[in-house]
Image (cartoon, helix red, strand yellow):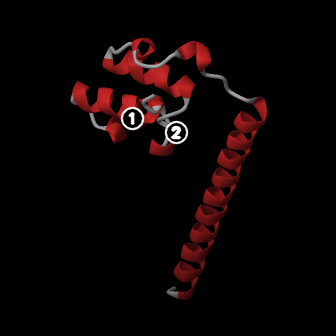
Amino acid sequence: MIHRGEVIEQAVRNSGMSITKIAQKIGKSRRWMYHIETMFKIGKIINYNFSSDINISNLSIEKSSYTMQVEENKNENYWQEKYLALLEEHAELLRKLNK
């Protein structure tokens, strides 16, 4: 059985659009491109029906797995925002020193 990531990647490449462009259109990073919910959004963008390539009835999303992914995303956003705040503070301190 072909991994759904391979199916998605091949369909996107055949569409002529880049994976990065698709990720931007759905508002996700490239690493989210292979989740089942995202797969359907990609299909809409590139006009492709993945149900013929992947047995949808055998796919399941475990709540704990999904929750963990959401938490990872929140964690990543937290550190990203923290980094940007520190960067802004640093820039402000440099401006004050240079006056």
Q: Amino acid at mark 2?
A: Trp
Disc 2 target residue = 32
- Residue 32: give x, y in percent of width and height: 52, 39
- Residue 11: give x, y in percent of width and height: 31, 26
- Residue 22: give x, y in percent of width and height: 37, 32
Pick whichever of labels 1 and 2 is earlier in the sequence: 1
**Front-most of residues 70 and 92:** 70
Q: Is residue 58 above or below residue 18?
A: above
Residue at disc 1, secondary structure: helix
Crowd rating for badge 2 (residues with CA inside 10 Å; few <14, some 14–19, many 20+): some
Q: Nearer the viewer, mark 1 or mark 2?
A: 1
Residue at disc 2, secondary structure: helix
**Which label is found at residue 36?**
none
**Which label is found at residue 6?**
1
Answer with left or right where residue 18 lies relative to residue 33.
left
Residue shown at 62%/71% (left/top)?
A: 89
